[in-house]
Image (cartoon, rainbow, N blue to C red):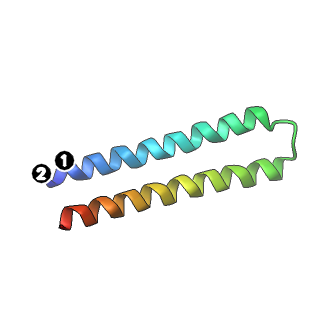
Amino acid sequence: MGYLTVGKRMISSLIYVVLGVVAFFIMNRFLGSLDGRLLALSGAIVALGTFLLSTIISIKLRLAQVD
């Protein structure tokens, strides 16, 4: 049972990473005419946001398992 929940957590965090990369490429398409530093900053913000979201969700899953 423990391996199954670890696998689910890894898959969910992988999904968030993939969504962050997809959002970054969509921004790259639409904001291609803007400055490269702004694009890099927006990509970093998206990556950080998806990482924090996946971390918060995994912590909530862990707390739900304890209860």
* 48 relative to 18, above or below: below
Point out which mark residue 1 bears: 2
> In which quadrant of the rendered image does the C terminus lie?
bottom left
- Report the side of 44 relative to 62 (left or right): right
Residue topped by disc 1: 4
Query: Which residue shows up at 56% across the image and 44% down it?
Result: 20
- Residue sitting farthest toward the top: 29
Residue 34 location, x and y as percent?
87, 42
**How far is mark 2 from mark 1, CA to CA?**
5 Å
Residue 65 found in image quarter: bottom left
Q: Amino acid at mark 1?
A: Leu
Query: Which residue shows up at 66% across the image and 36% down it?
Result: 25
Residue neighbourhood size for the residue with mark 2, other residues' Cα within 10 Å, grouped as few (<14), some (14–19), many (≥20):
few
- Report the side of 51 relative to 5 (left or right): right
Regarding mark 2 in the picture, which secondary structure is present there?
loop
Residue neighbourhood size for the residue with mark 1, other residues' Cα within 10 Å, grouped as few (<14), some (14–19), many (≥20):
few
- Report the side of 62 relative to 37 (left or right): left
Query: Which residue shows up at 74% across the image and 51% down it?
Result: 40
Residue 37 location, x and y as percent?
82, 53
Residue 50 location, x and y as percent?
53, 52
- Report the side of 35 relative to 18 (left or right): right
Query: Which residue shows up at 44% across the image and 55% down it?
Result: 54
Observer-nearest of 1 and 63 = 63
Point out which mark residue 49 bears: none
Q: Amino acid at mark 2?
A: Met
Observer-nearest of 19 and 60 = 60
Residue 59 location, x and y as percent?
35, 64
- Residue sitting farthest toward the left: 1
Asked if disc 2 and disc 1 are in contact, CB closer than 8 Å, the reply is yes
Regarding mark 1 in the picture, which secondary structure is present there?
helix
* 40 relative to 65, above or below: above
